[in-house]
Image: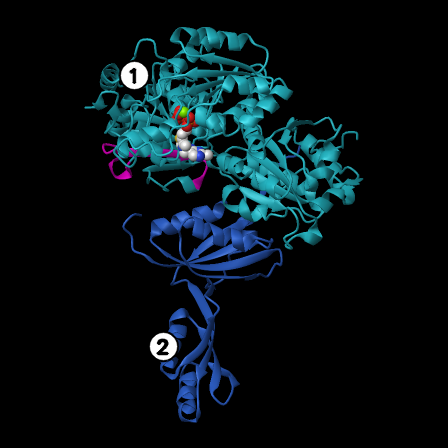
Amino acid sequence: MQGSKEREHTLSVLVENRPGVLSRVAGLFSRRGFNIESIVVGTTEDRRYSRMTIVVVGDEGEVEQVTKQLHKLIDVIKISELSPHEMVERELALIKVAADRSTRSEILQIVDIFRASVIDVSERSLVIEVTGDTDKVKAMIDLLRPFGIKELVRTGRVAMTRGPRAVSVTESRQGGGLQAVGG
Amino acid sequence: MSAIELATPSSGRKPAPVRMTGAQALVECLKAEGVEYIFGIPGGAVLPLYDALYNSGLKTILCRHEQGAAHMADGYARATGRPGVVLATSGPGATNLVTGIATAYMDSIPLVAITGNVSRSLIGRDAFQEADITGITLPITKHNFLVRSAKELPWVIRAAFHIATTGRPGPVLVDIPKDVGTEEFGFTYPETVDLPGYKPTYKGHIRQILEAARAIMNAKRPLLYVGGGAIASGAHQEVRALAEKCHLPVTMTLMGLGAFPGDHPQSLGMLGMHGTAYANYAVQNCDVLIAVGARFDDRVTGNLKTFAPRVEQIIHIDIDPAEIGKNVVPHVPIVGDCRAVLQVLLEKVKEKRHPEWWQQIDAWRREYPLQYRKVEGQIHPQAVCEALYEVTGGEAIVTTDVGQHQMWAAQYYKVKHPRHFISSGGLGTMGFGFPAGIGAKLARPDKEVFVVSGDGSFQMNIQELATAADHNVGVKVIIINNLYLGMVRQWQEFFYGRRYADSYLGTPDFVTIAKGYGVKGMLVTDPADVKPALEEARAHDGPVVIDVRVVPEENCFPMVPAGGSNSEMIGPKGWIE
Ligand SMILES: Cc1ncc(C[n+]2csc(CCOP(=O)(O)OP(=O)(O)O)c2C)c(N)n1
Ligand SMILES: [Mg+2]
């Protein structure tokens, strides 16, 4: 555990869709001194639950500790670490880049190569949408930087496992949700 | 209001909903949970709740500060294992609970804190006495709830008690907007709560338990290291059975005191920063360390790099998977309830003796006993704790505050039973001992309850003398009065060249203060008067404050300097060689 290398870990976390759940999760990371690279939250196939995709950097021991601490949150139902080889990941970025007549066509070529799209055009700028894994988005940003990036928004990473296996409530409920007896 | 019919598995039918307000529903929920006392102070936002409690049959204890109320509920919980309940109003009432909740959180104590909040339409508008108490207590509660409608309330209360008392126990806060208390709805109490994200593991993994048994059987120098988790799970009998079957020496953390009898020949007492020298030597020399419901806190381990250097196998039993591997990576991790795990483990080990190891330990015990230098005519704080042990036969419940007196009580009062030593371990909260003692005495009226306090600590919740007087709660407070924030002074003596920056207190006239509250006060300045004073306090029906003037600059030994190695201890005659 100790001495293992720091790397990015992608956690898929299924949580109850309750008010405050995001601050519980985010607060836990800051309180325990873990760094979040990105965190993305959205509703799932079942509206009672949300799914978070969290990217953290750390060694195996740290990530194990993060996972255990996350598990202690009552609203957290299931956590899976997605291994880089078994997951598909996507990120979306909107990039507002400076563009005039002299640079526009060159930029459009880059857009083409990356299968990105232009979603807004003006006299002096373009807004470009790019989707892909983190490396692709980063490469695109690097290529556009020399033209002058005026504004950049990224969604952070969303990910899921390849194949039929799912990080879902039904899977985690097997073995019985906890039943408390009243009185 | 008559008792509400609960849906029980045996009745097999759902009771018809009964129309009532949220506040009345809360009362019914608390009754259904078997709550005995509610500690608190009323205010605007909880008026509906207090009104429903009035003449409800539930006993409310009016405290003088919400922190006191929280510690009373905590003391009640520690003395019984049942959840304590505290009630406070919005804003300042709620924020006054914070230290009490954090204290319970650090020591894994089941507590249900109920706060009022401003009405729903005012939330988020910085209304009068509004505070985001669910936000504030997020990192110091096991879980918390903001109730958004009266019909949610029964489920939330059921869930709150369930979460507080199961798995690794802890405080849960329920924030109830004022108008939820007055809202009417059809009440039924849920039989079960389904929390898909909360499933504590009670049963240990059998393969791991067998692995542990093998390690214990092969051990030459085993040591049982027992923490508060053993008490929380009620594992004291199993701890004793295992220790006796395999002839294990037993050392306890501050929180674990009482999990194994302190007067048992196999007890090495407390380990760590102010632990006994022989317990720390045993840690530093053991080959198999069996941690039961303990979390390798820094006050216990000292410098982690030099902790237990000769250990070959660490077995770590804990109900909280996150504790395992947090500070020390064990060879045999066992997630489960201490009691359930030990019950199985007991069947898997055979009788064993370790004569050589015990010879070594006995040599340490002879050579490095707990000791202090006695000066004729002066009262030594250690002697006061010894006297308390002798006078009560070690049968009393002792609560403490925080500082030197806390460590002396832990060292010299040999706690015999679980839930008989009540102290703020994790947070180290001055002001905890006295209100916790009130809660403990209310919980266990059959027991003598002594509070070993400090002159500094006692003044942090001294106002609860009024609460003790109101209800004639027979707690006996011993103030180990050294005129100092003694533990601070000790550190300044050792590590800051005796520059006593703001650690001298002097003393108020505690006897007069006690009298002012209608409480019996006694002053003790002569060593010969210590025991008679304790006897007089025991005989008195009601609370007593005994101001014992001890040697002002006494130090607490042994002492492992913070971050040092456990085998390097300072004793009354300098570094222990
Ligand atoms: C609320 C709080 N404030 C400050 C401290 C830091 N502190 C630890 S021990 C201590 C001195 C306690 O003095 P006293 O109660 O007289 O006990 P003594 O050490 O003299 O026995 C202080 C100030 C604390 N633990 N808790
Ligand atoms: Mg003092």
Letter of the chain shown blue in the rendering? A
- Amino acid, disc 1: Tyr
Q: Decide whether residue B308 is among the magenta residues.
A: yes
Against B259, residue B151 (above or below) is below
Pointer 2 with pointer 1, Cβ within 8 A = no
Question: In this orientation, which residue lies closer to the viewer: B493 or B133?
Answer: B493
Pointer 1 chain: B
Give the residue displayed 51% in from the left and 88% down from the top.
A122
From the top left corner, tell me how far across and down residue B223 is, in percent.
31, 25
Against B49, residue B276 (above or below) is above
From the top left corner, tell me how far across and down residue B465 is, in percent.
57, 23
Q: Is mark 2 within 8 Å of ligand 1?
A: no
- Amino acid, disc 2: Asp
Give the residue displayed 38% in from the left and 25% down from the top.
B404
Pointer 2 chain: A
From the top left corner, tell me how far across and down residue B367 is, in percent.
22, 16
Letter of the chain shown cyan in the rendering? B
Q: Crowding at label 2, few (<14), some or many (≥20) Cα neighbours within 10 Å?
A: few
Q: Quadrant of residue B382?
A: top left
Residue lying at the far bottom of the rendered structure: A101
Q: How many marks?
A: 2
Q: Crowding at label 1, few (<14), some or many (≥20) Cα neighbours within 10 Å?
A: some
Residue under label 2, please give it: A142
Helix, strand or loop for disc 1: loop
Residue lying at the far left of the rendered structure: B577
Give the residue displayed 61% in from the left and 33% down from the top.
B86
